[in-house]
């Protein structure tokens, strides 16, 4: 009897040991790598880390028997810093998964490393479509939005209003150029035309000169292919120069709710753009956003909500695969549907693109808003299938 | 109608005018730096941060005390000037005997502290500040639409710039100041309180930055990062004009604004480096700057 008990205990120990051994280093470590002090710190930054922690808490801090740990770092919007931090995390920090990484240049650098080192990469902040196109990776998941979705959503909506010629004010780096390129493709496809473009350096404070050139072009739409502080300054100064009064429409190709908050409704009213998330969509989003606000002091942006959703889906996949082995988890992530407050019936495609509904929003007039953060009218829901680029056309070698 | 390299003359006039507006900002900021360097021999790296503080004081006045733009125009520079007095009395004054480098390091550290503190409390996206009602709207000049507010910025900053130049170069007080820079001991022997004068100069220099901050608030987002975006260009302006030269700072500020404006038309991608290209050329040909004296 005693020997049987012993044998049983030994077997149990072995079994639990075997289960434990499935999670490398006995911990699932999630690295949130983003801009924590520069122009994207408000739309990603600590808020993304809070969102990741909220996902981990929902699992009780444990997955597949191993504790979940969140680590954070600031990439300062520099691709080289992002790359060396990612390398350090993977090589010596036992980080299993890297999340967020706004700034497409930084994200492309990290994509290269995670692909080579076989680590899961959950992208919420970056926009470049190359991340699920020519530069796609079996371990890279593009979650929240991409430049195609932004360009297609906003470009189509304005075209339907009869606004057919475009002039671009573009941030002169990978992200801005890609956003401009995607929108140009969409405008041309629909039968509109692009009459001109001006490229400004990242972090310009004065846009008057570029706006004047855009105004002189007499285009129906002035598209701002930039983000963060660049976008808010451009919109604010466009109002100052009376551009909307003269009949031209402004299109923000990538705006976040924090940008609208920073601009104030009087400068931002009437702007139309595409969003991946809004806190006031339904009970689930309101409930989650309230919890987020209690920790972060403001409503979440789509990037932060996307980090939550991506991390949660990753943890679900680890739970289902009973391991943090990247190949197995990546397969599970593609297999399982994405179902949470951010994405309803979301689906991960072969190229790593997560398909979910997007929203075309219009910024409210100051009189229509009932309080802080009540900023959008959701004009229409863009169904997942048309919101994102067909994976077969993405140019990603993983799509057969 | 003639086109200059494919740019119609109307567009060119518009761009030159915008260049002048930006130039007047550069002039106002680099003037404060030049005054402080010329009189105190301190390279004030905190200048950009204090410009940001000026804009934030205007924003705080509006949002917490309901005091509008015109109050801010007076109160914000005063507040920044007072901060300047405290910094000078408690910290900077201990460093005059040492190498320039120590003042530079101290003010650089202060700039990081100011920026970090405001970033912690207000985030990086910035805060909106409305254009005062009196200056809303604009004029159609035929070749461009000039917002009234921008016109006001050019006029007021030019008045302040040339007023400062006049006070330092053409009045008795200015003469004392210049003398105190050359030989403080001798000037003190004549019964003039040099330490107070030095504090007042620093306060005035940073108050100019505060004023520029208030002027900038309705145009740019009031953001903790607004100072660091501008300060490097302003330093280049001071170097090109000649460290410490008052007139040099004003004229170079305006000139570089124009040059930047032209770059934005012909090759916009280079608009953020054209100033540094000019700086490199000037340093090669005339190391003391366009208006500087060799020491």
Image (cartoon, grey):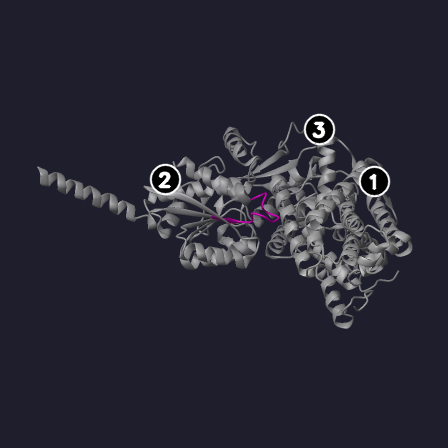
- In primary-sequence order, the first of circles 3 and 2 is 2
Whether residue A124 sits left or right of residue A7 in the image: it is right
Q: Which residue is mark 2?
A: A62
Whether residue A131 sits left or right of residue A1 in the image: it is right
Subunit bearing disc 2: A
Residue A92: x and y in percent read 40, 56
Q: Which residues are magenta?
A: A32-44
Picture residue at 89% right of the left edge, 53% below the top: B166
Q: Main secondary structure of the magenta part?
A: loop
Q: Residue furthest top?
A: A370
Q: Are marks 2 and 1 on the same chain?
A: no
State yes or no: residue A42 in magenta: yes
- As measured in the structure, the alpha-carbon distance from the residue carrying label 3 to the one carrying label 1 is 21 Å
- Label count reads 3
In this rendering, which labeled residue sits more in front, label 3 or label 2? 2
Q: Quadrant of the C terminus of chain A?
A: bottom left
In this rendering, which labeled residue sits more in front, label 2 or label 1? 2
Residue A386: x and y in percent read 54, 44
Residue A69: x and y in percent read 41, 44
Q: Which residue is mark 1?
A: B137
Subunit bearing disc 3: A
Classify residue B133 by image quadrant: top right
Dot 3: within a 10 Å radius of its alpha carbon, few (fewer than 14), some, or many (20 or more) residues?
few
Q: Residue furthest bottom?
A: B285
Picture residue at 79% right of the left edge, 63% below the top: B242
SS category of the residue bearing label 3: helix
- As measured in the structure, the alpha-carbon distance from the residue carrying label 3 to the one carrying label 2 is 47 Å
């Amino acid at each position: 009897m005693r020997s049987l008990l012993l044998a049983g205990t030994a077997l149990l120990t072995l079994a639990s040991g075997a289960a434990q051994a499935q999670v490398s280093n006995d911990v699932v470590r999630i690295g949130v790598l983003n801009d924590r002090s520069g122009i994207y710190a408000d739309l990603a930054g600590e808020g993304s880390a809070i969102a990741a922690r909220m996902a981990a808490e929902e699992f009780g801090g444990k997955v597949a028997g191993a504790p979940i740990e969140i680590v954070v770092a600031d990439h300062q919007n520099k691709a080289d810093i992002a790359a060396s931090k990612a390398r350090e995390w993977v090589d010596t920090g036992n980080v299993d998964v890297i999340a967020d990484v706004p700034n497409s240049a930084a994200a492309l650098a990290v994509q290269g490393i995670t692909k080579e080192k076989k680590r899961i990469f959950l992208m919420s902040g970056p926009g470049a479509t190359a991340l699920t196109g020519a530069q796609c990776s079996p371990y890279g998941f593009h979650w929240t939005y991409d430049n195609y979705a932004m360009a297609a959503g906003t470009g189509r909506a304005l075209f339907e209003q009869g606004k057919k010629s475009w002039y671009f004010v573009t941030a002169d780096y990978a992200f801005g150029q890609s956003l401009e390129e995607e929108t140009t493709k969409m405008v041309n496809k629909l039968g509109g035309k692009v009459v001109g473009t001006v490229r400004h350096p990242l972090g310009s404070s004065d846009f008057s000169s570029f706006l004047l050139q855009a105004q002189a072009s007499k285009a129906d739409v002035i598209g701002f292919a930039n983000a963060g502080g660049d976008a808010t300054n451009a919109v604010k100064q466009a109002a100052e120069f009376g551009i909307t009064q003269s009949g031209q429409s402004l299109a923000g190709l990538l705006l976040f709710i924090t940008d609208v908050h920073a601009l104030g409704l009087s400068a931002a009213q009437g702007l139309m753009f595409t969003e991946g998330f809004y806190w006031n969509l339904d009970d689930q989003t309101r409930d989650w956003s309230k919890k987020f606000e209690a920790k972060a002091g403001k409503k979440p942006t789509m990037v932060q909500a996307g980090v939550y959703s991506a991390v949660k889906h990753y943890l679900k996949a680890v739970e289902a695969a009973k391991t943090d082995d990247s190949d197995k988890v990546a397969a599970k992530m593609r297999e399982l549907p994405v179902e949470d407050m951010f994405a309803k019936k979301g689906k991960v495609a072969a190229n790593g693109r997560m398909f979910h509904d997007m929203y075309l929003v219009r910024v409210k007039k100051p009189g229509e808003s009932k309080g802080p953060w009540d900023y959008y009218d959701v004009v229409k829901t863009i169904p997942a299938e048309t919101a994102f680029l067909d994976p077969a056309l993405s140019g990603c070698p993983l799509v057969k | 109608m003639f086109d200059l390299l494919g740019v119609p003359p109307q567009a060119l006039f518009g761009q030159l005018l915008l260049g002048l507006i930006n130039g007047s900002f550069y002039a106002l900021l680099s003037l404060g730096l030049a005054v402080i360097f010329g009189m105190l021999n301190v390279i004030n790296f905190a200048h950009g941060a204090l410009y940001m503080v000026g804009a934030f004081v205007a924003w705080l006045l509006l949002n917490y005390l309901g005091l509008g733009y015109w109050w801010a125009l007076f109160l914000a520079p005063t507040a920044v000037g007072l901060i300047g007095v405290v910094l000078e009395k408690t910290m900077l004054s201990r460093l005059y005997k040492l190498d320039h480098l120590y003042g530079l390091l101290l003010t650089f550290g202060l700039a990081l502290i100011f920026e970090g503190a405001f970033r912690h409390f207000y985030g990086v996206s910035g805060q909106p500040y409305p254009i005062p009602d009196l200056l809303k709207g604009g004029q159609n000049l035929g070749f461009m639409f000039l917002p009234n507010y921008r016109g006001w910025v050019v006029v007021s900053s030019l008045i302040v710039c040339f007023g400062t130049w006049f006070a330092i170069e053409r009045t008795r007080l200015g003469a004392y100041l210049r003398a105190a820079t050359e030989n403080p001991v001798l000037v003190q022997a004549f019964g003039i309180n040099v330490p107070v004068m030095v504090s007042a100069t620093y306060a005035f220099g940073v108050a100019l930055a505060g004023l520029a901050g208030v002027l900038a608030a309705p145009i740019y987002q009031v953001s903790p990062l607004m100072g660091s975006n501008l300060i490097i260009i302003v330093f280049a302006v001071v170097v090109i004009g000649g460290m410490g030269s008052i007139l040099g700072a004003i004229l170079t500020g305006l000139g570089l604004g124009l040059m930047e404006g032209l770059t934005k038309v012909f090759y916009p991608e280079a608009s953020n480096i054209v100033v540094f290209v000019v700086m490199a050329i000037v340093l090669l040909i005339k190391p003391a700057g366009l208006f500087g004296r060799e020491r």
